[in-house]
Amino acid sequence: VILKGNRKVRSLDWSVVRSWDNKELSLKVDAGSLQPHSRADTELWLARQILDKQIVDMDGRRVVRVNDLQLSQVEGSTLVIGVDIGSRGLARRVGLEGLGRRITAALGLDWPQKLISWEAVDPVKTDVSSVKLRIAHTKLAKLHPADIADIVNELSPDDRSAVFAALDDEKAADTLEEIDEPQMQASILERLDVERASDILEAMAPDEVADLLADMPRERAQQLLQKMEEDEAGDVEELLAYREDTAGGLMTTEYVAVLHTLTAAEAIERLRELEPDAESVYYVYVTDEEEHLLGVLSLRDLIVAKPETKIRDFMIKNVISVGLDAGPREVAAVTSKYNLLAVPVVDEHNRIHGIVTVDDVMERVMPARAGGRRRRIF
């Protein structure tokens, strides 16, 4: 318990509390014997940091406001066992719960308490009044990125930064990709230091990074590109050179390609080395040493082939592809006509530059996404 008075802040162990209610705290010791309070990194001030603040309800995967706290005696200790997020908790705080109960009873209405177990609570903000707390959002970090994104959408900019500070690079990258608002994505990155932001970008798909940087100030975008690893930055810069309403702007440079001279066994070993994301292995593309697109095959074709068989001997040679300048509707028409999950993008010399996945092109041609933003050329 923290006591404030006479411009001093003192602390006492709960064991010296004789009794307490909403108006008074009675002690078993003389108040003069209390020691000045030195705050520990792991402490949370309930009144200052929890009451009337936003918290994450881990069970409901949502952001809620705390109107009251539920305390209980457990084996001689007083513990926080829950928070009240309903109107009844707020009425109790201002001394109107009794009146509210009489009114709802007279109207024949139920007025339940809306309680959340403390075990299901994760405080959003870990930096209050310039005091840095070492409280890891371990429960929050275990949620699916889509759920974290929904929570982040409801938070203030400062609270969003607190959440992302608690996530590792991979989870932060996945969460950022799940956020639908480009301006919010950019705002989150701009609040992080350049080193941390670039680490997150390196864990994202290049096409997602290109879209994100297009919504940031040029100077900040350049800083982030310069901090990224050279290979990742190069992929992003290539995408930024294309208009977003072209196949070049829609494509991702994350795809799987193998040389036509490899055997099936060697190609499988190459896949193990690459460890590609699931989205990028819809198809395995076959090229020569200069990246000319020669063929395509499915993972099934690769797995069932005899290990010593050369790729060029069983690949599909007539590859359906689109040009770098192809429009979204043309790409969508090709994927629909040939029932493709992804289509390769080639230049005038038939060199492969990337692939456009069916979900990316459908997002572009949907009415809600019509007239998408134009990328700057860096």
Image (spheres, rainbow, N blue to C red):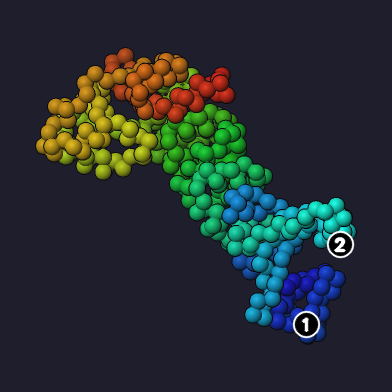
Q: Residue at x 30, y 19 (%)?
A: 320
How many other residues sit within 10 Å of disc 2, few (<14), some (14-19) or many (≥20)?
A: few
Q: Which mark is residue 41?
A: none
Please tell me whether residue 61 is drawn above or below residue 185 in the rendered image.
below
Q: Is residue 245 visible?
A: yes
- Which residue matches tag 1? 18
Please tell me whether residue 340 is drawn above or below residue 40 in the rendered image.
above
- Which residue matches tag 2? 98
Q: Which of 297 and 175 is in front in this view?
A: 297
- Marks 2 and 1 sit apart, C-alpha to C-alpha, by 27 Å
Q: What element carries label 2?
A: helix
Q: Which residue is drawn at 46% across and 44% down?
A: 199
How many other residues sit within 10 Å of disc 1, few (<14), some (14-19) or many (≥20)?
A: few
Q: Which residue is drawn at 51% across and 51% down?
A: 143
Q: Which of 367 and 190 is in front in this view?
A: 367
x, y percent for residue 105: 84, 57
Q: Which of marks 2 and 1 is nearer the N terminus?
A: 1
Q: Looking at numbered disc 1 in the image, what kind of residue is underneath it? A: Arg
